[in-house]
Structures are given as structure tokens and as C-alpha cells.
Image (spheres, grey):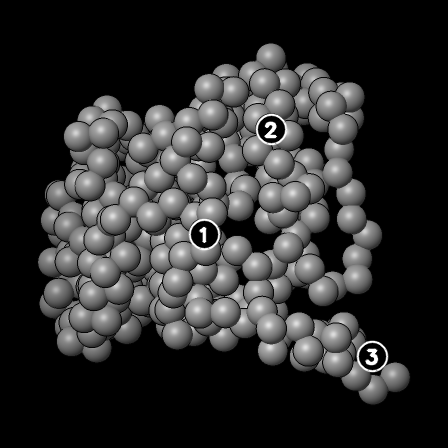
Amino acid sequence: MENSHINESILSEEILEDQKKNRIDHMTYLPDMEDIGSDVMDQVVSAMNAYDYDKYTKADVKRAIAHDIRTPEDFAALLSPAALPLLEEIAQAAQEETRKHFGNSVYMFTPIYIANYCENYCIYCGFNCHNKINRAQLNDEEIEKEMAAISSTGLQEILILTGESRSKSTIEYIGNACKIARKYFKVIGLEIYPVNSDEYAYLHECGADYVTVFQETYNSDKYETLHLAGHKRIFPYRVNAQERALMGGMRGVGFGALLGLDDFRKMLLQPDTMLIFSRENTRMLRSRSPVRGCARSSTMTGSIRWMSMSHSFSR
């Protein structure tokens, strides 16, 4: 049947009416959101707007490949269109850099969704609050059973995920999941809705080691058109989540963009820019905190990122 693949709930009158009331200013903090007064967002957006990838030449790319210590400027060149004819050389350099630091080791972990309730309306996401899907939330017994089963395979790191719903997946609920996970795993990561620094401190006390928050896109204008309702709509609160996590004592933070929403070159550059600015701004807070950088991207891009950032962010 024609158009049978379309999610009709997205086109409903209910959503259209909801948008008239709830499409609030995406740059204004809500009352329960902590404003830490950081200038990281301004610096990141400025760097994004200033990035002109068409200015780089094949010679710039070759210089970046040849450098022993690669800078963010080198990474900008490696992302440019001028790098396309040199992908094989980039891949070989990335492999050499990876093996220098990790050998042939493969580090594995697994994610586990403990709930999929969500209060956001992100138009690209199947979890969005208007989508009519089955929702579930594991109880303590079910979480324990899943953790034990995963641990029995030999994995030593777990990433706990929820949909972004404070009312369903409360901080206490997530903290309890961390306490259960601590019985089975050496490293515990979280990919949940952004929270305030005191809440990150609580989750760290419960056993969480690091936090990953995907900004999806660092273009605030594009962001506004994609995140129509819910806490996730507030752009600056999400941008500053990693810094609040470090303030709360987390040992590491992850960044990322969802490729395909906007200019992929500028989006791939931004997680690395965030690494630089967040590390500088939190040096006095957590001088020994390793910062983890990641993006939803290909293995090739991940390797390029490691080439660019490994020296700046070695432990």
C-alpha cells in the first residue's frame, strides 16, 4: 500500500496541537536545569562556523599524514574533500597509530537498555514520545539477571542506556542499576538523559565511571528543527553535559554527532573540539580525568580521530 511505511503518528493533529504549546525556545534553560556558566558552547560553535574545509589542499593533507603529533588543524585537513584521493594513505597511517598504542588488542563491551520510555520528540528517532511502540522497563531482578548473563561471557565493561524520561527512569532507578552492575563489571558507562552535576556525582558514587551524551548536531538552528519537545530540546544544556559530568566526578566523558543530520565534516570536527575545550575548562576540577571521545561514525573516521587526538589526550 502506498506510503504504508510512514509513521502516521508524526502527522497527527494531536502532535500539531502539542507543538503550538510545547515548541519552546531551544536556547533557554528550563527551571530544573543547572547553568554552570561555561563558555564551551560559544567556543565550539565559533570553531564550527570558522571551519572552511574547502581551503585545504592535497599538500595540507599530506603534511597531516606525515606529522608524528597531529593537531586539530591536521584533523581538519584530513576531513576535507582534498583528502579523498589519499584515503589509502590515511588508512595506513591510522592503522600504524592504532597499533602503536594498542597493538592488535580488541577491546569489547556491550550496551544494555534497561528502559525505553522517552519524553522527547526527536523527529528522526523511533523512541520519540509520540511513536506508538511497546515500552518496557526492567525491574531490579531483571537487571540483575541480565547483568549476570552478560558477565558470564567474559565481558568486563557495560554501557547502561535508557530512553530520556526522568519520570520513568529516575536518577535513583539508574543509580540502583549501577550498583547492581558494579557487582559484575570493572567499568560502567552511562548513556542517559543529561543531568545536573550533583546528580552525576550521585551516579558516580553508585558506580558509574563515564558518561556519553550525543549532541546529534552542533548546529543550533538545525538542532531546533529536529528536537521539537522535551528536555532534549534545550541545546545549551545538552552541550554542557560532559562538563557537568566531570564536575560530578566522572572519570570520563564521551561526545558524538549523528551523521546525516547536517554537514558531516563539521559535525565530525566538533566532538574533538569539545574534547579540547572541556579538558581545558575542567583541568582544575579533574586534573587526572581521562576524556573519552567517540562519534557515531565509520571505523575509518574513528581511526583518523585517534590519529589527531591521541597525543593530546593520553593518560
The residue pinned by badge 3 equals: 4
Q: Is residue 93 visible?
A: no
In percent of the image, x 54 and y 42: which residue is there?
192
Q: Amino acid at mark 1?
A: Pro
Of labels 3 and 2, the one closer to you: 2
Q: Give percent across and percent down for residue 217.
A: 41, 64
Callout 3: SS: loop
Q: Give percent across and percent down for residue 30.
A: 45, 55
Q: Amino acid at mark 3?
A: Ser
Of labels 3 and 1, the one closer to you: 1
Q: Classify mark 3: residues with Cα within 10 Å, few (<14), some (14-19) or many (20+).
A: few
The residue pinned by badge 2 equals: 172
Dot placed on the residue nearer the N-terminal end, 3 or 1: 3
Q: Give percent across and percent down for residue 138.
A: 75, 33
Q: Is residue 137 above or below residue 44?
A: above
- Residue extending farthest to the front is 31
Of residues 269 and 310, the one drawn nearer to the viewer in this rendering? 269
Image quadrant assignment for residue 267: bottom left
Q: Is residue 291 above or below residue 35?
A: above
Q: Amino acid at mark 2?
A: Glu
Q: Is residue 180 visible?
A: yes
In percent of the image, x 37 and y 30: which residue is there?
248
The mark found on residue 31 in the picture is 1
Q: On the rendered image, what quadrant is the C terminus found in?
A: top left
Dot placed on the residue nearer the N-terminal end, 3 or 2: 3
Q: On the rendered image, what quadrant is the N terminus found in?
A: bottom right
Dot placed on the residue nearer the N-terminal end, 2 or 1: 1
Image quadrant assignment for residue 62: bottom left
